[in-house]
Image (spheres, coloured by chain):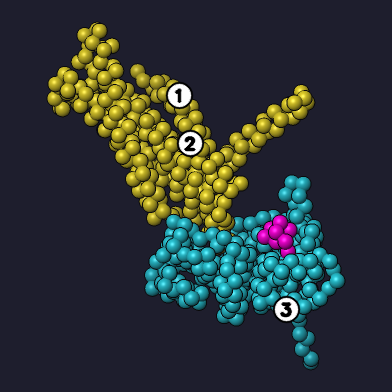
Amino acid sequence: MQEVNQPEAPVINIQDLHKSFGSLHVLRGVDLRVEKGENVVVLGRSGTGKSVLIKIIAGLLKQDRGDCLVLGQEVSTLNQKELRDLRMKIGFSFQNSALYDSMTVRENLEFPLVRNVANLTRAEINEQVETVLDAVGLLQTINQVPSELSGGQRKRIGIARTLILQPEIMLYDEPTAGLDPITCLEINELINEVKEKYHTSSIIITHDLTCARATGDKIAMLLDGQFLKQGTFEEVFNTEEERIKSFYDYNFIQ
Amino acid sequence: MSAKKREHVYTRRLDSAFLAVYNGYVFFLRFFREVFKGRMEFQEIVKQCYAIGNKSLLLIGMTGFITGMVFTKQSRPSLAEFGAVSWLPSLVAIAIVRALAALVTALISAGKIGSSIGAELGSMRVTEQIDAMEVSAVNPFKFLVVTRVLASTIAIPILMFYCTAVSLLGAFLNVTLNEGTSFIAFFESAFEQITFLDIFTSLAKSIAYGFTIGIVGCYQGYNASKGTEGVGKAANSAVVISMFLIFIEEVIIVQVSNYFRV
């Protein structure tokens, strides 16, 4: 008998998602699929709801309408325990890194680990912390506090902190914002390394086209609360659509 | 402003006031729900107790000492009019143990600890550190709020006893310099009128004040918004609201304790 290959379910499947803040209708029927092992870049101008989208995926915000399925589960209907279990599979890298100021780099990395994985010995904790720090190339900063780190180092530590729980999905909120061009390239490389090494599927929120081209398997252009176009970088920007063209021109002139 | 517009503004203010009370109540209930749930962050509680005690020790010590000295000095002329200067140690001790020590400790702590908790959690909220805890499957309420509220509820009664001792020392210094009373004679006279109810009431008050300072500071900080402006507002509101509640609690606890006094 011939075996039928079932298509693998998407890790993230968003359909007709709406979100408003008061009278401001930010997301107006967003559809997005992220396949396993895929890096999807969500591009768009500031204030178009890019961060809102990934906050809904991480369960930090609730949509007003529509479906948001992550690893087959509708995020908005999960109870506390189910949400906690799901979040262990999601890594969220914040725009400003959101490192805990009062803790050293080691403590920042240990924090989610010791609270989510039971019965770890001190040696195991140290090993895991050092492994992820090594993966982001910042093992030497282990005893420093966040205020002693540069912007790029903080981003890397923020990514390391999410990697410590070995997530299946990575959500990057403006990973290259506020960084110099060389550090931006390093962060882009790191995003690709994370995908290769940890086999993650990712959503990368950015308005930096260099980052989008370097990291994205698929680009989704968010304008006026909807995805105007989705596809490869070339497919999206090989267009006559005026708003997409002006976004491209402005980005590269900048 | 037209009458209709003014009415609309007042209605909105009233709505937001009721909403704030309701949200505070929900936060208060959540504390009791979370405190017995899941793993207890003992290390963080001890760290916060140390931070609270360490931060306030010198200030409370100095304020307590000055309060004891000044209260004794101010009370002396009134007692001298009736030839009752020998009652000074008892009078001062009653005032310190029943009211002053707990109140001074609470007001200093509201300013120092309440504002610090409000500002710390507020800045954690606006820099997304609280969101970062949440997405890494850690309960930020349990780690940040429960630990700080428990720490202030434990540390402030200890600070109150410390304040009582230092205030009495201040009072003793004034008495011994003016009347030449010995240490033993002063404290024998001072504790003659102090009952178990006085000490228990004082302890109950400082537990209530500690809880109030912790929960108000945490509520304001945890719900801070609007960037750095929100952090300042959270710190400020934490002080003002907790001081206001402390005075209300003072009135209630004094009324209740007087009911038990013979």
Residue A198 in the image, given as x and y percentages of width and height? 57, 78
Q: Could you say whether the residue bearing mark 2 is in a helix, strand or loop?
A: helix
Say which residue appears at 26% left-offset and 33% top-offset: B165
Indicate the amino acid at tag 2.
Val
Q: Quadrant of the C terminus of chain A?
A: bottom right
Is most of the magenta stretch helix, strand or loop? loop
**A229 within the magenta span:** no
Q: Which residue is mark 2?
A: B239
The boundaries of the magenta stretch are A44-52
Query: Chain A shown in which color?
Result: cyan
Where residue A8 is drawn, which disc sits there?
3
CA gap, disc 1 and disc 2? 19 Å
CA gap, disc 1 and disc 3? 67 Å
Picture quarter containing residue B9?
top right
The chain to which mark 3 is attached is: A
Q: Could you say whether the residue bearing mark 3 is in a helix, strand or loop?
A: loop
Indicate the amino acid at tag 1.
Val
Residue B256 in the image, given as x and y percentages of width and height? 43, 24
Indicate the amino acid at tag 3.
Glu
Q: Which residue is mark 1?
A: B251
Q: Are marks 2 and 3 in contact (CB under 8 Å)?
A: no
Tag 3: Cα neighbours inside 10 Å, few (<14), some, or many (≥20)? few
Q: Could you say whether the residue bearing mark 1 is in a helix, strand or loop?
A: helix
Picture quarter containing residue A83?
bottom right
**A47 within the magenta span:** yes
